[in-house]
Amino acid sequence: MSNVHPFDPLSPAEISQAVRIVKNAIPHEPLAFRVVTLLEPPKSQMLPFLHAEHAGKANDTNANTPARIALIHFNRGGGVSDLCEVHVNLDAQTIVQERSLAGRHSFQDTTEMQAMEKACLASAQVQDALRLLQLPEGAVVQVECWTYGTDGMNDMRERIIMCYLYMSLTPHGDSNHYAYPLDICVEMLSETYSVKRVLSLPLGENDRFGLVSEVGVKPFDRRKIHRSSEYHPDLVPERRTTTKPYRVVQPQGPSFHVEGNLLTWEKWRMRVGFNFREGLTLHDIMYDGRSVFYRLALSEMFVPYGDSRAPYPRKAAFDLGSNGAGVNANNLKLGCDCLGHIKYFDGVHHNMHGDPVVLPNAVCCHEIDDGILWKHTNFRTNNAVVTRSRVLVLQTIITVGNYEYIFAFQFTQDASINYEVRATGILSTAPINLDESVPYGTLVAPGVMAPYHQHLFSLRIDPAIDGHRNSLMVEESHAMPLNDPAVHNPFGIGYTTTHKFVETESPLDIDIARNRVFKIVNENVCNPISKGPVGYKLVPHPSQMILAHPSSYHAQRSEFGEHAVWVTRYQDGELYSAGENTMQSAGGEGIASWIRSRTSPLSVRDEDIVLWHTFGTTHNPRVEDWPVMPSEKLLVSLKPVNFFTRNPALDVPISSQAENQSVLVGESGGSTSANPCCPKL
């Protein structure tokens, strides 16, 4: 495997090899394989390898290449109980570590969801409850499976899936069933695919929740039938005719180059990774030969709902830890999800038997025009020098039930990195009486309530700013005092900045009033111009933190949601800010617990550190979000701060009409212009 880079995801052949080793070790028992993925090498092993690689010596016999280790989770007996973890050394073809995860539960995958839907509808108990609803003729019942958000009402040693029921009133397969949420839900046991309980949902502020046999249900209210909630073009007669085609043309091809998982573009160099949980990961990110970041990835996302009536507190989804960003990645399509010259990266997963499964087109790589990068007009000569911004985009899209999330790393020519999240898709809905409303949701259609909820993302930033010993500096801007004899500020307009290094692992918060800035710096490398340390700054997305009470399961399970920024000392294995096993977790396993568990406070000054940024949106739905939601866009940036000795984009080619060939409306040609955008160079 000498031609395989240590950061490369497991190939189909490696997955098959790892599964075979485990099956041979446990020959007389059926196994259900939940996770077969790369266990990334310890950083202590990777750094010497990367140093040799950067020096062009990675293939030398002295280069110490880390072993390929597969991380495997499987259930004994072929069910969902007795979860086990093993590490398999693919080079030595041996199991090198194993541990029991008894009492813990693996994530929920699409295959399981589909099987659970069928089992739910086939249940006599469910069919009896549906008959009580007296649904309209031709109604097609749909089942929506949710991971169980711990609420204290059930024994979490059982792996439970919540099934919420909806219906469609047209035979079209893409009819919006979320427009007709039904009045019942079902608790399903994953081990046996059997019904635990059929429950009646509350339809108003004071309605009771409980067993259908005890609370009862009413026939479906025909007054709720409406025709305004479809989104598919087959079912929406209105269509704009004013939008003309828009085509991205690069006559000389794209500016990026891909070799395996190694991606280079302009002055950027990085390795593209992908796994079942985080989806897209980026490794060993360099700019113009300088180390910038060791690893970037979304660590976790949490979607807690704010409807406090049972059973809705169970709607608390960890879309990475309990569902998997990688396994829910879309098969991206040309001309739709990405425009222009596209390079796709496939993902690789597996089925329950351990057979590898390719996830085609899971990540797209392409370039976009992003407006003006920099410009100046000399008013004395009337000469304008304009440089347009080209951005490299690495994008993946996941569908988790009703929602789509678009995740994109954006690399710029001025050495910045943006992380953009867009949320779209369809609101999760609940039934409500026609004559009622509730204070924690929005009515979006007759008898359809969209509850308030939050989307909280945790971005894990593993910096390597000119090396792996970095510090976090917090900078604030303060107005200078007036009439203070110790300070010269006679006009009252002065302000200065303060700088403080974070000494030990801790959480921090955004403070817009003080323009609080988080700078990751290397105190060992001095900028010759500024005379201060080189660095990158985090430009956070200001967001409301988790609204659930600190004593709630929501808050205890999502510790990262309490603060906007966390800084920790790097530890192998600390990748997931809500803990390794979020499925029906009870809390006390995430980033705050790590910090509390240290025997003594760990220094983060001039150390190998990790920054974690919590950001998101408090989504109180609008009617305009229905029946399909326009994208809600969130943006986080990492920008160089005193990392260079001048604008790093000064050498980007000047924009010209001869190259770009824009066209005046009404004219067919585009090779000339009466008003060139810059002087002839």
Image: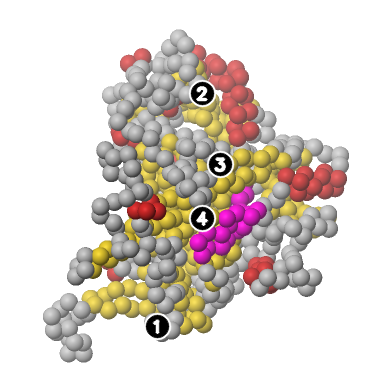
Is 571 magenta? The answer is: no
**Residue 132 spot, x, y in % from top left:** 47, 14
**Residue placed at 47% from the left, 24% from the top?**
174
| Mark 2 residue crowding within 10 angstroms, few (<14) / some (14–19) / many (20+) | many
Disc 4 or disc 2, which is closer to the eye?
A: 4
Q: Secondary structure at mark 3?
A: loop
Give the Cα separation between the discs numbered 4 and 2.
46 Å
Q: Which residue does the numbered mark 4 point to in the structure image?
A: 255
Residue nearer the viewer, 193 or 614: 614
Residue nearer the viewer, 650 or 627: 650
Disc 2 or disc 3, which is closer to the eye?
A: 3
Q: Secondary structure at mark 2?
A: strand
Disc 1 or disc 2, which is closer to the eye?
A: 1
Task: Give the mark nearer the N terminus: 4 vs 2.
Answer: 2
The dot on residue 329 is 3
The dot on residue 142 is 2
**Residue placed at 43% from the left, 84% from the top?**
528
Residue nearer the viewer, 248 or 206: 248
The dot on residue 529 is 1
Give the Cα separation between the discs numbered 2 and 3.
22 Å
Amino acid beneath label 4: Ser
Total marks placed: 4
